[in-house]
Image (cartoon, rainbow, N blue to C red):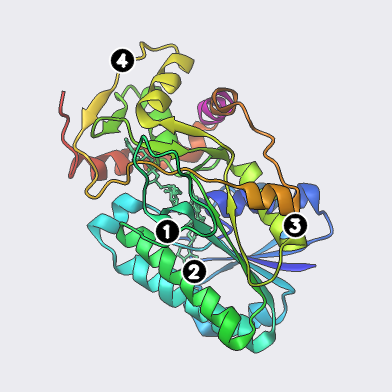
Amino acid sequence: MRVLVTGGAGFIGANFVLRTLETRPDAQITVLDKFTYAANPHTLEPVAGRVTVVRGDIGDAAVVDPLVAESDLVVNFAAESHNDNSLRDPSSFVTTNLVGTYTLLESVRRHDTRLHHISTDEVYGDLALDDPARFTEETAYNPSSPYSSTKAGSDLLVRAWVRSFGVRATISNCSNNYGPYQHVEKLIPRQITNVLTGIRPKVYGDGRNVRDWIHVDDHNDAVWTIIERGELGETYLIGADGEVDNRTVVETILRQLGQPADAFDFVTDRPGHDRRYAIDSTRLRTELGWSPRYTDFDAGLAATVDWYRNHRDWWEPVKAGVEASYATTQRVLN
Ligand code: NAD
Ligand code: DAU
């Protein structure tokens, strides 16, 4: 199978490429990636001989079309992915997440190529901490941020192209991923690398916001399950029952790195900060037979801490720039 992985040099896309090489050695993989600040060119270096890498924009039809024409499957991970950035400047979110997805859709429509579109649970908005409900495939879209609204829009484009033009596509909406190769702007790698560089971790607001954590390999195995066994035109939610609040995540990282659990700062909250995400992945589990392998979050987190400890050369070059940028908008409260 010839697989085009868009955004394959970013966190989840690169892990997808590496996992696919392990689990499906016959797959011929081409990565199309713009190599924005979020891509790390070193991630795919060890597999350079086994993967074709094209530097280009999913919004550029002249680049996209020939690649789609020679693929059996497109898996679209390419996106602007960070909420905080979308609050500073939403423009690239509109261009990549909406116009980029539109460009891909027109191309897979022209060539009748199968598409799997990667999306997020944030399209459903948020839940109260004491709400017994979790998101399901039937939950109404209600996104909060420029990031999540452009992802919601991209999902709706895919659904419309399925219904109106018969495009062969599936969508998955997953909860918060953790694992190796995640950019240090995101909560878990930011705080691990803060501790490793002598900076106190930074927790937004009261630290009680809840995220539903899943290991990136579990996400990517679920994506392959949907590609191979999912029904065309359908949406599947991916989650591993991993609800934890941010304060607990940071305290756990501190303990795992041998620091006092209270050695962190509270900083100004993210505007419009979603309170809680929680996924009910019953459909994926019962209809398609997927289940997560990483069910012990503390153990998965400890392995991730070790990965960052042992791969300083991967993240150190960008660490200071990320912290300098955060310092312009975030004030310590304690
Ligand atoms: P990331 O920011 O780490 O990687 C995104 C990749 O897309 C980068 O390599 C970047 O260079 C590339 N890219 C950006 N704009 C592009 C463009 N115009 N053309 C081609 N490539 C472009 O993001 P991630 O965390 O790996 O997320 C991947 C996908 O998964 C996104 O669609 C995101 O919405 C979704 N998602 C992420 C999470 C999470 O927890 N990180 C959870 C659910 C869904
Ligand atoms: O739910 C899926 C989404 O998860 C994906 O669609 C996004 O691409 C991905 O970035 C992630 O979004 P979040 O906004 O939840 O992730 P982030 O790592 O930015 O923040 C996680 C939580 O931690 C959130 O409540 C904000 C908080 N936070 C974040 C940072 C960076 C802190 O308290 N301190 C921080 O320094």
Frontmost residue, 231 versus 327: 231
- In the shown orientation, is residue 285 left or right of residue 331? right
According to the picture, the residue beneath numbered tag 1 turns out to be 123
Q: Is mark 3 on a helix, strand or loop?
A: helix
Q: Mark 4 points at which residue?
A: 262
Residue 95 lies, with reference to residue 110, above or below; the image says above
Q: Residue drawn at (36%, 60%), measured in percent from left and top?
A: 142
Quadrant where the C terminus lies?
Answer: top left
The residue under label 3 is: 50
Observer-nearest of 288 and 96: 288
Residue at mark 3: C-beta within 8 A of ligand 1: no
User: Dot 3: few (<14), some (14–19), or many (≥20) neighbours within 10 Å?
Assistant: some
Q: Which of marks 4 and 2 is nearer the N terminus?
A: 2
Disc 2 element: helix
Between marks 2 and 3, how big is the CA–CA gap? 31 Å
Q: Nearer the viewer, mark 1 or mark 3?
A: 1
Sooner in the amino-acid sequence: mark 1 or mark 3: 3
Label 4 vs 3, first from the N-terminus: 3
Q: Residue 42: percent from the left, percent from the top?
A: 56, 48
Residue 273 is a magenta residue: no
Name the residue at 44% across, 20% down: 252
Left or right for 298, reference 226: left
- Say above or below: 264 vs 279: above
- Label 2: few (<14), some (14–19) or many (≥20) C-alpha neighbours in 10 Å: many
